[in-house]
Image: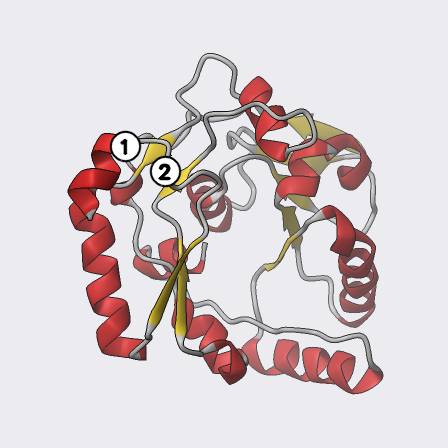
Amino acid sequence: LSAVLKKAGHETDLVIVYENEKSKKRLVERIENFKPDFIGFSVMTDDYIWACELSKLIKKIKNIPIIFGGVHVTACPDEVIKNEFIDFIILGEGEGAIIELVENPHKENIKNVWLKKKGKVIKNKLRPLIENLDSLPFPDKELFFKEAPYLKGETYYFMTSRGCPFGCSYCFNNYLKKLYKGSNWLRKRSIQNVIDELKIGKEKFNYHLVYFGDDCFTFNKEWLKDFF
């Protein structure tokens, strides 16, 4: 999300907040200095309560619009949007929605976005999935390394695909497949695009190991053979 926002000409910042008062104080200072137009949380189920607590803290300081997105939000949108300290939620893939939202904050019909208007929740439909993953900029890893230098280690973490060919009932991919029924949920970046990111990552971060975070890295054997 940071990469697509920067590509569109916006400034981004990242704060990692730990569960202590010193860390929360640092969050407040960063907000005062950066003066963001929006604050976003990428939320998984195990950190949902924590994200809610931070949002309440932020709202006590300044009434900055707060956006929640991520897997928990996509699975439980009605639960999340009812919180008075959350202004917008983004379901599914957020790249297109986040750009449109920050550039048109008063627009009511942005796909993938739910918002509140005069006490009512406006629930917009989903936009199509991003078919061409090569169209996305490479992830903004510097944003994380600047905030947490310890993350910059010997290993380069990245993904070559989105989705999974399987439908395990315990997995979030199962839910997303149903949400995007009829769409091509399983998508792969081109080999050249992956090689380009690996080269740039090597030049910038001098890693020694590569960690493929795909849900199923080996599903396309022809792609895999050509990549090797």
Name the spot of residue 199 as percent of width and height, x first. Answer: 20, 66
Residue 156, image quadrant: bottom left
Residue 36 is tagged as none
Residue at 70 percent across and 74 percent down: it is 17
Report the Cα–Cα distance between label 1 and label 2.
6 Å
Give the quadrant of residue 210. Answer: bottom left
Q: How is the image coloured?
A: secondary structure
Q: Quadrant of the N terminus?
A: bottom left
Q: Which quarter of the picture shows residue 223?
A: top left
Q: Is 183 on the left-hand or right-hand side of 31?
A: left
Q: Is residue 199 above or below residue 19?
A: above
Kindly check if marks 1 and 2 are in contact, taking CB atoms under 8 A apart as contact. yes
Q: Which residue is mark 2?
A: 218
Q: Secondary structure at mark 1?
A: helix
> Of all residues shown, which one is farthest toward the bottom?
22
- For the residue carrying disc 1, how many other residues have a C-alpha within 10 Å: few (<14), some (14-19), or many (20+)? few
Residue 73 versus residue 158: which sits nearer the camera?
Answer: 158
Return the x and y of residue 205 as percentages of the image width and height.
32, 78
The circle on residue 221 is: 1
Q: Nearer the viewer, residue 92 or 165?
A: 165
Please give the name of the residue rendered at 64% of the width and 76% of the height, measured from the top-left corner. 31
Q: Residue at x 49, y 72 (%)?
A: 144
Is residue 181 placed above or below 129 in the rendered structure? above
Q: Mark 2 is on which residue type?
A: Thr
